[in-house]
Image (cartoon, rainbow, N blue to C red):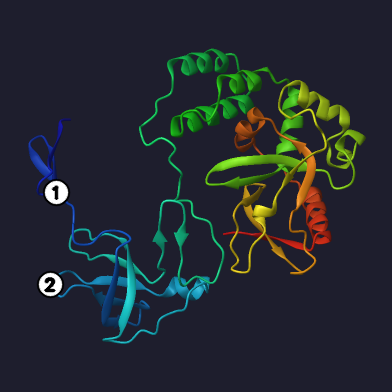
Amino acid sequence: MVYKLIIIEKSQIALLYFKNKLISLIMEHTLYRVNDIYLGKISSVLSSLDAAFVILNPVSKNGFISFNHFRDGLNFDCPTMSTNKNILAQIIREPTGTKGPTLSCDINLLGKYMVILPFSKSIQTSKKVEIESNKETQEISEDWLNEFENLARLKSSEDMKLVFGKILSGEIIKPGSFSIKTIKLISQLDNQAAKLFQIFCSQAISLRAAGNIFDARVVSFSGSAASNSLNPFGLSFDSLNVLHEYGLIISDYNSYMHYSACIANKQKQVGGILHFQNKNFGLVPSDEVKYDKTLQLHGVALTKAGKELMDIIPLTHADNYKDALIKFLETKHLELVEIE
C-alpha cells in the first residue's frame, strides 16, 4: 500500500493519496480558531435539540451551540435562547467540511500561567497550562536509556514491570523526570520495602503548583513519628527506618512545611494545591478569624527520589487516614474541599 501526503503551506491545504487516487482533502480554516471569542447573534433556535445556530460573520458559516451542559454544571449563567439575541461565545471546535464552528458560552481566557474564567462560580484548576522551563525539545539521554534497559531486564514481577513502564512513559513525555539514581533505587526495593512505600504514598499529601511538587509528606497528627505516632496507619518507627535506608524519606521524622498556600482567599483562589489520593484539594476557612493562617504541618517527608516516584505507585485506600486528616484540619478551622 502506497500513501502520499502533499502539503501546500501557502494555501494551508493537505492532500492524501492512495495509489495515486485522492482519498482525503484537508483545508485549514483561518477565519475561525479555537479559543477565539465572538459577539454573535442567534439566527435560529432548535428547540428539540436545546441548541441554536449563531451568526458570527455574515459571509461565513454559522456556529452551533448547545445549552445542555450549562444546566448540568450550574457553574455558569445559562443564556436565554431567542432569535436575534446577541450572545458572547467562544469557539471550542474549528469548522470541518460543511459544518461551522462549535461554540460555548463557557468563556475562558488561557494565559501562560493561569486560566481566567470570568463567569465561573467555582474554583477550578487547569490541566492545559504547563510551565515550560526549556522551550527546546529535550531528548532522553543515551546513558539513561542504557541504564533503564539494564535494570528493567532484571524485573520479572508484573507489579515491577508496571512501575518501570510508567517510568519510561513519564520520561518520554518529560525527559529528566526520573534520575538514574531514582531508577536504581526502585530496582533495589525488596517486597517489604515496596509494600511499605505503597502504604506511605497512599497516605501522603503533597504541596503542588505549576506542575511541581514542593513537598510531600505523611502528616503526624499527634507527636513525632519517631515515637510511633503513625503506627495506627501502618507506618511504625521500624517501617520508617526501612524506607529511610532505601533513601525514600528524609532522616528527620518530625520535619515541617507550611501549607498556607493551599488556603483559599476571599475570592476562593489558592496559590498551591493540596494533592491527596490522586485528587486536588483546597482549604477553606470555616472561621475567618480563628483559622490557622500559617498551617505548619509536621510529619515524615519524602526525598527527591521519593517525590519522583510517588505518582507512579499504585495507591491503596486510606479512608482512616483521610478521616484523621479531616478532623485534624477541623481543629485548625479549615475545611478540605476538592477542586474540580
Of all residues, the one furthest to the right in this rendering is: 227
Q: Quadrant of residue 217?
A: top right
Q: Amino acid at mark 2?
A: Val
Q: Quadrant of residue 111?
A: bottom left
Q: Which residue is mark 2?
A: 59
Q: Is residue 6 above or below residue 265?
A: above
Q: Is residue 83 visible?
A: yes
Q: Secondary structure at mark 2?
A: loop
C-alpha separation, residue under disc 2 versus residue under disc 1: 20 Å
Q: Which mark is residue 21?
A: none
Whole-percent x and y of residue 271? 59, 55
Of all residues, the one furthest to the left in this rendering is: 20
Q: Is residue 40 above or below residue 230?
A: below
Q: Quadrant of residue 124?
A: bottom right
Tell me which residue sits at (48%, 51%) in the image. Answer: 127
Whole-percent x and y of residue 334? 75, 62
How many numbered marks are there? Answer: 2
Q: Viewer-proximal residue, 332 or 50?
A: 332
Instruction: Please give left or right for residue 19 compared with residue 212 in the image.
Output: left
Q: Amino acid at mark 1?
A: Gln
Q: Is residue 192 visible?
A: no
Q: Which residue is mark 1?
A: 12
Q: Secondary structure at mark 1?
A: loop
Q: Is residue 20 above or below residue 120?
A: above
Instruction: Please give left or right for residue 327 compared with residue 102 in the image.
Output: right
Query: Mark 2: few, some, or many residues within 10 Å (few <14, many ≥20)?
Result: few
Quadrant occupied by the C terminus = bottom right
Tell me which residue sits at (44%, 19%) in the image. Answer: 141
Tell me which residue sits at (77%, 47%) in the image. Answer: 297
Whole-percent x and y of residue 166? 54, 31
Q: Earlier in the sequence, mark 2 or mark 1?
A: 1
Q: Viewer-proximal residue, 113 or 42?
A: 113
